[in-house]
Image (tube, helix red, strand yellow):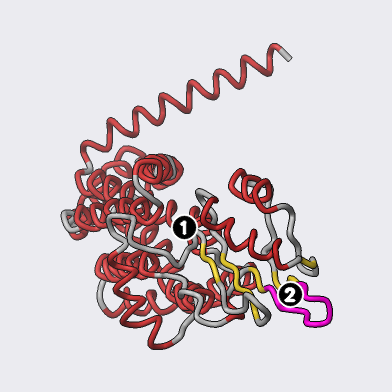
């Protein structure tokens, strides 16, 4: 056991110093160094966006589970076709230009994602709680109710309203109390409507309902898009999310494959193992800063602002990519290969 620990320690120290030596050696390969900086930025942004998309869908947009699962399937199917599409673009243009196109596509996709906004309830079927009047006994039957979770917000909501489930029967007083609860609840994200009966037509929407916008610094953007696009098309949030998934699938496979391909072109073949190990390390290192930034901005502002801050990272990486001279990088790689092979003779 002691020998095993010593061996692991030795391997760790060896790996660390190899990484340090590779990093020091990269100063001779300007294009690779600049590209790694660009990759660190845009890959950090892309990995953060993809990693936090599920949380954004559930917490901010309240995407139904069925639509979320369907979107994941769409992304997987479309990604294969997207990778082939960008492979053709890389041959017709260049790998760098094709990567540019994919990153610009990501910029528009993130802006599109920020613009997603649930429609305001305009029909009784769109409310979270539907309370239908039962004329026979003058009560209200809960025909629709949300599935509450164990989150702190939902626990607080249950403490105020009680655990009202689908199929519950409420008196008129209990129904009025539920509707009035939306005024007293500080962060309710639900909505309710009474259908028919003495209080028929009364409705209530919680102050944290996903359709309510205007509090965040960039909420003007989803508000504008909803008024100009989503409302005229009557396109609910689930279908908006499906469209986003389709767009993500097109660029996701292409951006990942092109990023590796471009690094291959400017890396010496004789040192591919060494350089790609460092490239892999950068891939993992680039999944740290983005999530931290997201959490910080969410705490200070809101989730849409946090997503926008990640967009800034992607744009920064795309700008740095402009400074990568692929032709110069290829020449440097060829020269290094010749030098290494001459030493082996």
What residue sits 36% from the left and 79% below the top? 88
Image height of 74 relative to 42, above or below: below
Is 123 on the left-hand or right-hand side of 196? left
Q: In the current view of this chain or complex, which residue is farthest to the right?
A: 136
Residue 197 is drawn in which quadrant? Answer: bottom right
- Could you say where residue 2 lies in the image, as x and y percent from the top left? 70, 11
Q: In the current view of this chain or complex, which residue is farthest to the bottom?
A: 233
Q: Quadrant of the N terminus?
A: top right
Q: In the current view of this chain or complex, which residue is farthest to the top?
A: 2
Residue 199 is drawn in which quadrant? Answer: bottom right
Q: Earlier in the sequence, mark 2 or mark 1?
A: 2
Is 83 on the left-hand or right-hand side of 318? right
According to the picture, the residue beneath numbered tag 1 turns out to be: 207
Labels 2 & 1 near each other (Cβ < 8 A): no
Q: Is residue 52 magenta?
A: no
Residue 85 is drawn in which quadrant? Answer: bottom left
Image height of 258 relative to 32, above or below: below
- Could you say where residue 58 lies in the image, as x and y percent from the top left? 55, 59
Would you say residue 29 is visible in this rendering?
yes
Is 2 on the left-hand or right-hand side of 180? right
Secondary structure of the residue carrying numbered label 1: loop
Would you say residue 277 is visible in this rendering?
no
Q: Is residue 132 magenta?
A: yes
What residue sits 19% from the left and 60% below the top? 327
The number of numbered discs placed on residues in the rendered structure image is 2
- Quick one: 209 or 309, which is closer to the camera? 209
Q: Which residues are magenta?
A: 131-140
Residue 74's tag is none
Image height of 112 relative to 155, above or below: below
According to the picture, the residue beneath numbered tag 2 turns out to be: 143
Q: Main secondary structure of the magenta part?
A: strand
């Amino acid at each position: 056991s002691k020998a095993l620990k010593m061996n692991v320690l030795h391997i760790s120290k060896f790996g660390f110093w190899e990484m340090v030596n590779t990093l020091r050696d990269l100063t001779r390969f300007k294009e690779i160094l600049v590209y790694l900086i660009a990759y660190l930025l845009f890959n950090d942004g892309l990995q953060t966006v993809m990693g936090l998309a599920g949380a954004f869908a559930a917490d901010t947009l309240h995407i139904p589970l069925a639509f979320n699962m369907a979107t994941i399937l769409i992304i997987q199917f479309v990604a294969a076709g997207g990778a082939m599409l960008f492979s053709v673009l890389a041959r017709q243009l260049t790998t760098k230009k094709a990567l540019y196109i994919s990153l610009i596509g990501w910029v528009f996709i993130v802006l599109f994602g920020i613009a997603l906004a649930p429609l305001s309830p305009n029909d009784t079927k769109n409310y979270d709680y539907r309370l239908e009047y039962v004329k026979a006994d003058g009560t209200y039957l809960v025909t629709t109710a949300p599935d509450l979770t164990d989150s702190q917000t939902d626990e607080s909501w249950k403490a105020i309203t009680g655990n009202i489930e689908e199929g519950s029967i409420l008196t008129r007083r209990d129904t009025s109390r539920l509707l009035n609860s939306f005024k007293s609840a500080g962060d309710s994200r639900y909505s309710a409507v009474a259908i028919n009966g003495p209080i028929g037509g009364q409705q209530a929407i919680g102050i944290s309902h996903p359709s309510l916008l205007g509090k965040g610094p960039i909420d003007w953007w989803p508000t504008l898009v909803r008024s100009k696009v989503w409302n005229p098309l009557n396109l609910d949030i689930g279908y908006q999310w499906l469209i986003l998934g389709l767009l993500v699938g097109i660029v996701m496979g292409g951006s990942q494959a092109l990023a590796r391909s471009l690094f291959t072109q400017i890396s010496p073949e004789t040192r591919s193992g060494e350089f790609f190990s460092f490239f892999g390390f950068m891939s993992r290192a680039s999944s740290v800063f983005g999530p931290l930034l997201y959490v910080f901005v969410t705490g200070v502002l809101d989730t849409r602002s946090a997503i926008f801050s990640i967009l800034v990272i992607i744009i920064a990486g795309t700008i740095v990519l402009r400074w990568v001279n692929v032709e110069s990088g290829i020449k440097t790689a060829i020269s290094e290969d010749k030098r290494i092979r001459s030493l082996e003779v």
